[in-house]
């Protein structure tokens, strides 16, 4: 019996492989078959998650993600390897479900990242035969090698210890796996590493593989995790400076786990990623098919903060929102200093609102109520009085915004220093 993918007309294309194994792509992030930067969400396959499987195999959900959520990619995660229990699918058993999903991707024009999904499977040098992972890719890699919508992410967070990647036996086994997939699908984009954190000099790991990968068809994945240890994207931009194509294949929503934090001052990681110009895929609970986070956090935040990638007509321009709060400490002479909170007010489409009255309050170590009128860029800087001595934790909170023709929802927005 033919699979759905085998029954569909094969989408063929030809690409000229430029350079050798050390030839790096000029692009610094991953685009899909249509040339657009990848923006996506996960869908999970697993015998223990029948609701998610049903969701994955319903073509209408792919169309909804495309037309309503304005996403162009699904990261399809086969999670049975993580369970390590008897009641899980074998590779042969999961293949028909992957076939349906690739068919849905083809019919909807969505990119699909097929991901073998385990966690720390090779940590500490264990399981370096990659046995189950190899069996998966031996079946999958040649199966979709001619479909330009398909991307292969060959392992998820194979280790939590970044030093493992450069250990001789790990590196040798990992490269063997990579080369097996590359040989079976020479023109498919392979996503490698899927680092579990950005709290480590990832560029050092990648340089250890510099001359042994086909960079024309290889991208580097990272996950934007690290909790309080991570506040900046410096380790990501270091890889970009080296000329590598990068993609974030996991970021989670604020308040979900301790290892999720704001990066580069943006509360929702998607804003950080858009500012970096990085392709991305979000993360939600494995069996979450509600799309609540996308509809109630991601899209509203993108519209309000001005990084929405969809149709600008979807936004409500009469909303007044706090686009950003940045806090700085400035010296005022003779050892004294003051805090400055710069607030930008935007409308619901991300455009600045001039002449808005902003009311705010410093709380904690520094205290005081302040107000001011935004300039043409929608910004106002409010200062504390000068002070001396050791600086301790404080926050600035926007308590109200008033502007003709606009409505503020009244919810306080704060930033801690």
Image: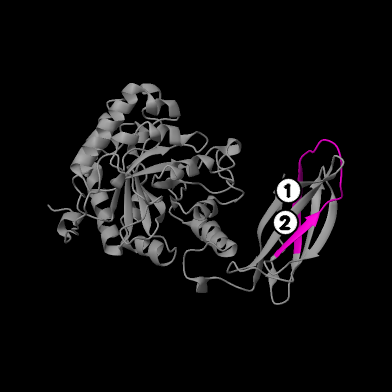
> How many numbered marks are there?
2
**Residue at (81% x, 54% y) in the render:** 383
Residue 152 visible in the displayed image: no
Q: Secondary structure at mark 1?
A: strand
Residue 244: horizontal and vertical position, in percent?
A: 39, 44
Residue appearing at x 69%, y 70% in the figure:
376
Quarter occupied by the C terminus: top right
**Front in this rendered view, residue 198 or 301:** 198
User: Percent from the top left, x then y, of residue 143?
Assistant: 19, 47
Identify the disc placed on residue 342. Answer: 2
Magenta residue span:
379-400
Determine which residue is flagged by label 1.
328
Image coordinates for residue 342, horizontal then vertical, percent: 72, 56
What x and y, as percent, mark residue 88? Answer: 30, 37
Q: Is residue 304 above or below residue 405?
A: above
- Give the side of residue 409 with respect to residue 155, left or right: right
Of 380 and 120, the residue lying toward us = 380
């Amino acid at each position: 019996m033919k699979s759905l993918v085998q029954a569909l007309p094969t989408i063929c294309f030809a690409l000229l492989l430029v350079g050798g194994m050390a030839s790096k792509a000029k692009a610094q992030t991953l685009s899909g078959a249509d040339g657009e930067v990848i923006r996506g969400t996960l869908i999970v396959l697993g015998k223990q998650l029948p609701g998610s499987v049903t969701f994955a195999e319903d073509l209408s959900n792919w169309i909804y993600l495309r037309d309503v959520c304005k996403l162009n990619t699904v990261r399809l995660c086969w999670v049975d390897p993580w369970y390590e229990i008897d009641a899980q699918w074998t590779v042969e058993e999961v293949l028909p479900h992957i076939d349906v999903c690739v068919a849905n991707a083809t019919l909807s024009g969505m990119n699909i990242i097929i991901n073998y999904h385990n966690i720390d499977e090779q940590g500490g040098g264990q399981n370096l035969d990659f046995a189950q992972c190899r069996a998966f890719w031996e079946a999958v890699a040649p199966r979709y090698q001619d479909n330009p919508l398909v991307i292969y992410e060959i392992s998820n967070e194979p280790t939590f210890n970044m030093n493992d990647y450069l250990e001789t036996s790990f590196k040798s086994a990992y490269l063997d796996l990579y080369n097996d997939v590359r040989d079976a699908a020479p023109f498919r984009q392979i996503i490698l590493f899927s680092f579990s954190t950005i709290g480590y000099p990832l560029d050092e790991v990648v340089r250890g593989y510099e001359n042994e990968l086909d960079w024309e068809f290889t991208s580097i994945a990272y996950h934007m995790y690290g909790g309080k240890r991570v506040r900046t994207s410096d380790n990501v931009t270091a890889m970009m400076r080296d000329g590598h194509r990068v993609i974030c294949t996991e970021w989670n929503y604020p308040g979900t786990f301790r290892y999720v934090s704001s990066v580069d001052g943006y509360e929702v990681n998607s804003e950080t990623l858009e500012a970096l110009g990085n392709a991305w895929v979000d993360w939600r609970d494995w069996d979450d098919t509600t799309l609540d986070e996308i509809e109630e956090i991601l899209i509203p935040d993108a519209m309000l903060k001005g990084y929405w990638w969809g149709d600008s007509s979807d936004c409500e321009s009469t909303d007044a929102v706090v686009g950003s709060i940045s806090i700085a400490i400035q010296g005022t002479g003779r050892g004294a200093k003051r805090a400055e909170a710069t607030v930008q007010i935007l409308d619901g489409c991300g455009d600045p609102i001039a002449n808005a009255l902003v009311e705010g309050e410093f709380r904690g170590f520094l205290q005081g109520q302040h107000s001011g009128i935004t300039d043409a860029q929608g910004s106002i800087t409010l200062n504390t009085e000068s002070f001396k001595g050791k600086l301790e934790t404080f926050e600035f909170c926007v308590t109200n915004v008033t502007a003709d023709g606009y409505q503020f929802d009244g919810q306080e927005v704060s930033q801690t220093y």
